[in-house]
Image (spheres, rainbow, N blue to C red):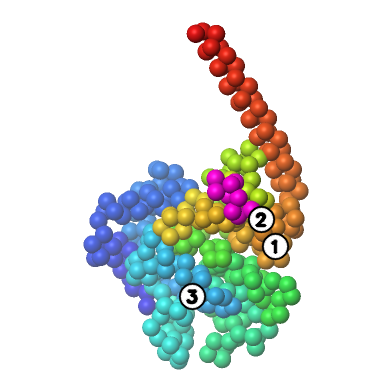
Amino acid sequence: MTTERTLGGFLRHRGVSRRAFLKFCSAMASMMALPASSVTALAEALEQARRPSVIWLSFQECTGCTEALTRSNAPSIEGLIFDFISLDYHHTLQAASGAAAEAAREEAMHENDGQYLLLVDGSIPSVKAYSTIAGISNLDMLKEGAAGAAAIIAIGTCAAYGGLPKADPNPTGAMSVEEIVKDRPIVNIPGCPPLPLAITGLIAHYLAMGVMPELDRLGRPLAFYGENIHDRCYRRPFYDRGLFAETFDDEGARRGWCLYKLGCKAPETYNACAQIKWNQGTSFPIQSGHGCIGCSEPNFWDKGGIYDSVAMGQFGSGPKIAVAASLGAVAGAGAAVLARGKKHKTETELDSDD
């Protein structure tokens, strides 16, 4: 359970140097869009932070969110569990099972009433019989856990918006956390699955500041969801020039042209995939040759086919994006003509000088 030792004490005990700790704080401040002057204050706050009790509830989900978390590299899963938080209940990661596991959950809630963080992944079926844990419906377990939580983090699109289980016709009556809990601070970390650093970064911010960061209108941290993927994508210059892959194996695809016509939803999807990437910054879907499917946006399963362009689906500004793409193609062609004209003029002037 939660100990009174500070995070700074734990880090020193684990052999983490002051230099390494400050480097982590600098990276965290940069990632959370904090000014450079805040690094010292962040470090001091984190050093004095107490390990909070964390209860993680998993409902209608695929374990993908937990899989994403275990691949976090800064901090690592080991650091997150043993140095940053006291993970007192998690179906997949805990050693206990059955009655012992439920006893641990109840003890953590009782001993840390009003102070623990409640992490939830998976949607919640409003029809109680569809999913139960130890004979308790998901709906009742969420309400019980939320009652004593200091704050709630909805991890993954299923918990944040209902996700795939809520897709039409929604047979289980799946709901998101914020549709059920109305009296607790809730932060959404959507994605299918979400970026690991969005989870660990949010927890680190909470440890240091004691409050959640600034959120957008959908309850997502602006530091990670403040810009759309399209504006940060390395393929954006090809979009602006009107250069698009028409199939996944054509010359445009091999040259890394924009995947908009192959269904990429990046123009309507807000996330930090293009900056942070996955697997320790190795890659992200667009870099791997597949268009963004818009998984961090509400109801993305019901907005059109994965390989349909934004303009063909039910995305609000799709027609505008289609027009922009057309203008991009025209502008690209015009720029090419202008460039060729300048090149010809330069060559002519060089010939005349000779």
* Sequence-earlier tag: 1 or 2: 2
Q: Residue at x 69, y 71 (%)?
A: 167
- For the residue pair 195 and 233, the one nearer the viewer reads as 233
User: Regarding mark 3 in the picture, which secondary structure is present there?
Assistant: strand
Q: Over which residues does the magenta segment extend?
A: 247-256
Q: Amino acid at mark 2?
A: Gly
Residue on which disc 2 sits: 263
* Sequence-earlier tag: 1 or 3: 3
* Sequence-earlier tag: 3 or 2: 3
Marks 1 and 2, how far apart in space? Answer: 8 Å
Residue 251 forms part of the magenta stretch: yes
In the rendered picture of this protein, how many numbered marks are placed on residues? 3
Q: Give the number of the disc on residue 56.
A: 3
In the depicted structure, whether residue 215 falls above or below residue 337: below
> Relative to 117, is 266 on the left or the right?
right
Q: Is residue 247 visible?
A: yes
Residue on which disc 1 sits: 305
In the rendered image, the quadrant that contains the N terminus is: bottom left
Residue neighbourhood size for the residue with mark 3, other residues' Cα within 10 Å, grouped as few (<14), some (14–19), many (≥20): many
Q: Residue at x 59, y 70 (%)?
A: 159
In the depicted structure, whether residue 87 falls above or below residue 220: below
Looking at the rendered image, the disc whose residue lies closer to the viewer, 1 or 3, is 1
Circles 3, 2 touching at the beta carbon (< 8 Å): no
Circles 1, 3 touching at the beta carbon (< 8 Å): no
Q: Amino acid at mark 3?
A: Trp
